[in-house]
Image: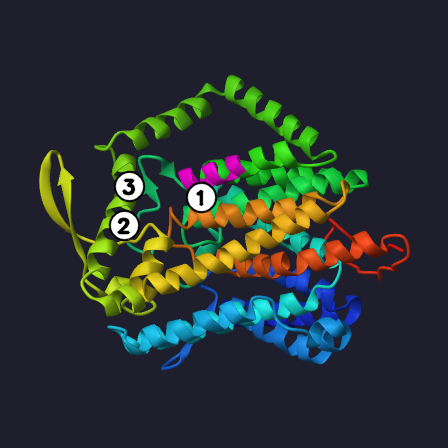
Amino acid sequence: MAIAVICDLFCTLWLIATAMRKGFGSALGLAAALLLVFPSGSRIPLPGLFDLTTQRVIVVVLVGLYLGIGRKNSGESADGPIPMRYLLSALLLWMLLSSAQSVVPAISFKSTLSQYFDFCALYIIYARSIRSREEFETVLSGFVAGMFVCSIFGLLEIYRDWKVTSLFPEVASRFADLESVDSRGVRVESTFDHAILFGAALSMSIPMALHFVTSAKTAWKKMYLWCALLVMLLCIYKTSSRGPWIALLMSVIVLAVFGRGKLRSTIAIIGVLMAVILVARPGIRDSIMSLYGETMDPDSPQGESYQWRYVLYHIAHEQLSQSAQRGLLGFGPESFYYLGLTADVSVDGEMHTVKVESCDSSMVELMMETGYVGFFLVALILLTAIYSTLRAYFRSSKENGNLPLVLLVNLCAFSFLMSNVALFGWGQQSYMLWILLAMAMCLPKFIGAEARNVSHVKLRTIESPFPIASYSQE
């Protein structure tokens, strides 16, 4: 507990000092980094209530800073309507209704309130506070800096066999029953609860780093960004997680086809570098091909893991079709692991009944816990944000089109990964998602304002706490 107190005090003081010295916009970027760096073990238990995690402390401090400083400086945006307010209200109402009919109502109500405080409060703060392109990029630079720190911890885990999470008390999570070592060897986790979650966050932060590499002006910033980019690429490979690999590949392809300016040439350099590595290190190529082959083999552990995702959809449909109430409301938030589900699976040609101990799909988990309506509302929130980034991309100038494109591929990557792992509504990656949702909903307004006023609008100075971006533009 002592180390958690130290982490909480450190984050609190740093955020307050940054907000007072550099402005609330810089504090938003710093918070984005800090939310990723600290593991779930950094928490102070409050018996009978909840655990005070470092992430929750950061959210509380941001709320206080917003009310004291940020709201005052936000002008009209602080008093305007919250983007997607009707969808968010509908989701809250539905989760409360689902909790009232839950098989574990106390846990469901607690989970609902926790998610709305942890994530929706964060969404509201960022949606009402970000007012310029410079603040958008300051927040993205925070994500890159945070994941760079996590990747450095990942290097220590890879080459020194030391985990930063060993400094914190062990915390049971929904991945507690899964081994961190399997036929793929040791899979790097850094500060995340599982390698696939670390890989998911990397698959979203790497496109951000690519964006900044193309716009960096000084040699030392380019050196920093290239170093961060290469370390993150190494770490995502070492996670041995197929979903994040595919998500990153799809994101890079979209950026290569639709990216503007120097982004395409940067991706080409990365592609050539990767090709050289695969030729020079055939072991890397063989390990990737071996994992692909095992995935296609239904009798291998990786093949069984892949097939299990389809089994989960069958289980969900079977359970929800038992009654109209369950089909609409589900079994209650956070109830999946209390249902005692079983499934009939084939093992060595024989059918066996096994206990369902994991849910490798956020989509299935949402359907089971909040019904088809809850799943539809979450899907609508994601699709609305994706549409918003598309609008911003087509309205942006040639020089400024990469920012909405990066947000677009990040949201699409997270949506894809929801079919591969239960990563929605908890963990560092969900804090990342809700900030990206807020940025996506705000982006078209500022892209349009830039297009109309580029010749005469003055942009205020923003001093970023990170070495990627500091702005003073008129």
Disc 1 crowd rating (10 Å Cα; few below 14, some 14-19, many 20+) is: many
Residue drawn at (74%, 50%) of the image: 467
* Mark 3 Cα shell of 10 Å, populated few (<14), some (14-19), many (≥20): some
Rounded to the nearest angstrom, the CA distance separating label 3 from label 1 is: 19 Å
Name the secondary structure under disc 1: loop
Magenta span of residues: 239-250
As drawn, 36 above or below 228: below
Which mark is on residue 188? 1
Residue sitting at x 40%, y 27%: 287
Q: Earlier in the sequence, mark 3 or mark 1?
A: 1
Of mark 3 and mark 2, the one earlier in the sequence is 3
State the CA–CA distance, disc 3 to disc 2: 14 Å
Q: Secondary structure at mark 2?
A: helix
Q: Which residue position holds label 2?
A: 313
Residue 201 belongs to the span the image colors magenta: no
Residue that badge 3 annotates: 305
Q: Label 3 sits on what residue type?
A: Ser
